[in-house]
Amino acid sequence: MPVPLAVSASATLLTVAQLNQRVRDLLDAGLDEVWVVGEVSNLRVPPSGHLYFSLKDARSQIAAVMFRSANQLLAFRPADGMEVIVRGRVGLYDVRGDLQLYVDAMEPRGVGSLQLALEQLKKKLAAEGLFAEARKRPLPFLPRGVGIVTALRGAAIHDLLVVLRTRHPQVRVVVRPVRVQGKDAPADIVAALADLQRLQGIDVIIVGRGGGSLEDLWAFNDERVARAIAASGVPVVSAVGHEVDVTIADLVADRRAPTPSAAAAMVVPDCADLGAWITATAHTLRAAMQRQLRRHGKELAAHARLLRDPRQVLTTLRLRTDELGERLLRATTARVRLAHGELQSGADHLQALSPLAVLERGYSIARRADTGVVVRDARALAAGDELDLAFARGSARVRVAGQRGD
């Protein structure tokens, strides 16, 4: 038989909620801030935008949550299997009595968050083909206008303008000043690219700034800036930082320049060099044309020696034409005479065979008056039949009185 539980009269009875509340208060008092290293697993992101995951090591794990207000500040995207360092507080979710780590900051272990975010975005944009050489356009040889997206203060704008004016003083330059670092810089750069594309005569755009740390250059690693450069209606040259700095803007742009000065030299030709090239090319072309003229002159002289005087050729052709005309006339006359003789002979033959010729010799042709049929046998006639007799001149109708024997 079970032994009844002995409850001291001085004992305080707690509900489950009260117990969980006391545990939570103790945790809040003793573990208000902790730093924990572990591996992310079972990561899920519901529509609320909060991050729910487990943080584990080789021996144990703890449930963790990072609310949307905190994870929106992350530069990288956490993923299962990633080792991270987190800052937070340990608390008890007293509804279910679950121990939970509430995270308010996170860094990838072994690599900075910005570097990790950069690598993640590179991989994403590369998979979409934004870095592919096939989609990049050539720069115009002699642009009408150059747009510049950079800060008004700093060495970059000075270097760009000096090189542009030195190499091509006549080119139109439009500077759209922007903030090149800070949280508002990406949106400012995107707006500047759109503004310059709306201007007529801007054939190429330079986007850039001077050098700096990864944090200083971070605006040019922003996904919005990368997509705006890729969607630009005119070619874009990226000139961010120094030669050793490579940003996502450099990878997406149609051309990458190691420095702002190099970008300016890339988009416009040097007018002095261009003038010298034109002069040299004109000299080369003139010399080539003179050689061609001399060669063709020699060929013309050689052909001229082989040609006869056109007047002599014309005289010969006229004489030949007269001779052929006379021969044609004689041949035609002879042919007409022959044809006339043949025609007369045929006519005489036909005349001899003609019934009219027979009638001229005193004969006549008898036809029945009623049918017009020629009568060839007297036995086909009967007394009283009427006949039409045709003579050499005229005809007569007669009536048969009777037949005579053969």
Image: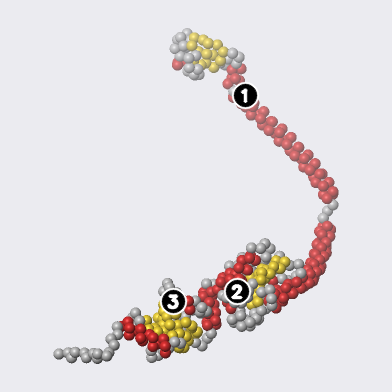
Q: Position of residue 342 (x, y in %)?
A: 66, 31
Q: Is residue 191 visible?
A: yes
Which of 57 and 253 lies nearest the eye of the viewer? Answer: 57
Which numbered disc flags the more N-terminal residue, 3 or 2? 3
Which numbered disc flags the more N-terminal residue, 2 or 1? 2
Taking the spot 48% from the left edge, 11% from the top edge, the residue there is: 386
Taking the spot 67% from the left edge, 66% from the top edge, the residue there is: 203
As drawn, 132 above or below 14: above
**Residue 251 falls left or right of residue 164:** left
Q: Amino acid at mark 3?
A: His
Q: Position of residue 396 (x, y in %)?
A: 55, 11
Q: Is residue 98 visible?
A: no
Taking the spot 66% from the left edge, 71% from the top edge, the residue there is: 177
Q: State the scheme by which the image is colored.
A: secondary structure
Which of 259 and 301 lies nearest the eye of the viewer? Answer: 259
Q: Label 3, label 1: how many angstroms apart (C-alpha)?
A: 129 Å
Query: Which structural element holds mark 1?
Result: helix
Q: Quadrant of residue 60?
A: bottom left
Task: Please give the residue where the numbered disc 3 appears in the rendered image.
Answer: 50
Query: Which structural element holds mark 3?
Result: loop
Task: Please give the residue where the numbered disc 2 appears in the rendered image.
Answer: 185
Q: Label 3, label 2: how many angstroms apart (C-alpha)?
A: 27 Å
Task: Please give the residue where the numbered disc 1 appears in the rendered image.
Answer: 351
Check whether the beta carbons of the residues at disc 2 and disc 1 lie within 8 A of each other.
no
Query: Which structural element holds mark 2?
Result: helix
As drawn, 347 above or below 142: above
Depth-wise, is mark 3 or mark 1 nearer the camera?
A: 3
